């Protein structure tokens, strides 16, 4: 490492007092209810304390712990790195990890280049919706994301309004530079990142660990206390047109069937995205006939879009209508499609 942990902590913003998280509600009995189901390659973690579940590779570990001010945290992190646990937001650059913070953690985000995820030139493959305006992505000087922090429109069940999820990719060859208002480089120990000095981060993202964290996050979902067993998507929605990996053109003719509970006021969202999950077009599927039923109901729509993206790969994402905005009620079905090569 070219920079010590102390220097990083000087660069990254110190703990703030904006949030006032409450005490942890996690008891020993509740922790014992949390489960890890193990297979040869993938392990499933179900957290009955904070009502979420995910899958993670066997080279990662899950830790339930507390941060200062009795703030609960659940970490998912790579076993390869010798680290001081638990992990929050300001950690060493080479660590790949996720921090679930159900009560928040009174701390400002990292320094350096950042954007709201709503203004980011990429997207995320997640099974739930989140507040893109309040969520942040943290960027290296080359524009690559090295971390992001997710906030919700409506907090998941048992989480409070300060709760969020911090995802930190592994950065190789990390370097931090401090630039004064006059445009000159200055020593990191003299850097006033809370003032007018600018902090710039550079390095390379480890692609393997990034793919692993992205896959963990794509498997993440929330659930309600005492809710019925989570149904397979195939028991909720079936898309007939277009077929999987179908070569598409505008307008796309979409049809299929979904259970009436997939709709609200006889409609449910659908959008077309490119390989980076940037939205190209969006509309809604429309139920044909009576939709206030648990049975399957036919649907159809037509979706028009403009220019083809540079890459041939894309997705149609069908979302369950969720007027409540609660992430534990979100479901998404992703259908791979292909764009013609120009």
Image (spheres, rainbow, N blue to C red):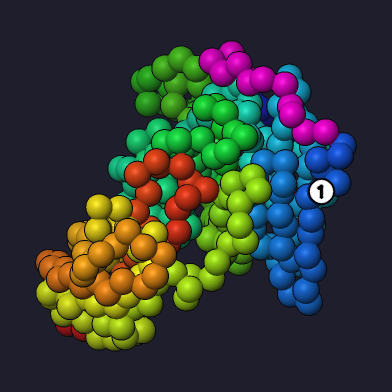
Residue 50 lies in what quarter of the image?
Answer: top right
Instruction: Identify which residue is drawn at 71% across, 63% down.
Output: 44
Q: Position of residue 59 (x, y in %)?
A: 76, 64
For disc 1, the marked residue is 33
The image position of residue 125, as x and y in percent, is 45, 60
Quadrant containing the N terminus in the rendered view: top right
Quadrant of the rendered image containing residue 272: bottom left
Q: Is residue 26 magenta?
A: yes
Q: Position of residue 11 (x, y in %)?
A: 58, 27
Looking at this view, is 139 or 327 the one in front?
A: 327
Q: Nearer the viewer, residue 182 or 228?
A: 228
Q: Residue at x 86, y 39 (%)?
A: 29
* The stretch drawn in magenta includes residue 5: no
Q: Where does the magenta region start and end?
A: 11-27
Picture coordinates of residue 260, whole percent (x, y): 35, 63
For the point 78% across and 65% down, the residue is: 37
Magenta region, main secondary structure? loop
Q: Name the side, left or right, on which 161 lies relative to 225.
A: left
- Identify the element where label 1 is drawn: helix
Residue 331 quadrant: bottom left
Quadrant containing the C terminus is bottom left
Q: Is residue 317 above or below residue 329?
A: below
In the displayed structure image, the side of residue 240 where residue 261 appears, left or right: right
10 Å neighbourhood of mark 1: few (<14), some, or many (≥20)?
Answer: few
* Residue at 53% across, 70% down: 232
Q: Is residue 145 visible?
A: no
- Does the rendering let one see residue 22? yes
């Amino acid at each position: 490492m070219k920079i010590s942990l102390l220097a990083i902590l000087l660069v990254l913003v110190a703990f703030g007092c904006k949030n006032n998280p409450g005490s942890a509600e996690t008891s020993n009995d509740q922790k014992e209810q949390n489960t890890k189901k193990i297979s040869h390659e993938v392990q499933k973690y179900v957290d009955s304390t904070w009502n979420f579940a995910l899958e993670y590779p066997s080279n990662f570990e899950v830790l339930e712990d507390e941060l200062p001010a009795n703030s609960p945290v659940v970490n998912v992190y790579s076993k390869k790195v010798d680290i001081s646990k638990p992990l929050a937001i300001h950690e060493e650059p080479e660590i790949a990890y996720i921090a679930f913070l159900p009560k928040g953690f009174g701390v400002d985000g990292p320094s350096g280049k950042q954007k709201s995820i709503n203004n980011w030139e990429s997207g995320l493959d997640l099974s739930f919706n989140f507040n893109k305006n309040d969520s942040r992505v943290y960027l290296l000087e080359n524009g690559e994301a090295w971390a992001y922090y997710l906030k919700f429109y409506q907090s998941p069940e048992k989480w409070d309004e300060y709760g969020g999820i911090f995802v930190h990719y592994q950065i190789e060859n990390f370097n931090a530079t401090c630039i004064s208002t006059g445009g000159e480089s200055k020593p990191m120990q003299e850097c006033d990142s809370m003032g007018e000095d600018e902090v710039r981060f550079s390095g390379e993202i480890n692609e393997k660990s990034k793919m692993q964290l992205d896959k963990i996050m794509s498997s993440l979902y929330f659930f309600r206390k005492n809710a019925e067993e989570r149904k397979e998507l195939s028991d909720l929605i079936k898309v007939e047109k277009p077929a999987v990996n179908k070569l598409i053109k505008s307008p796309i003719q979409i049809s299929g069937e979904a259970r009436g509970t997939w709709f609200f006021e006889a409609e449910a969202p659908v959008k077309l995205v490119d390989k980076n999950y940037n939205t190209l077009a969006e509309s809604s599927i429309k139920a044909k006939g009576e939709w206030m039923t648990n049975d399957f109901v036919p649907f159809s729509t037509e979706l028009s879009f403009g220019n083809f993206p540079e890459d041939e790969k894309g997705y149609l994402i069908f979302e369950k209508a969720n007027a409540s905005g609660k992430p534990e009620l979100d479901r998404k079905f992703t259908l791979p499609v292909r764009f013609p090569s120009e």
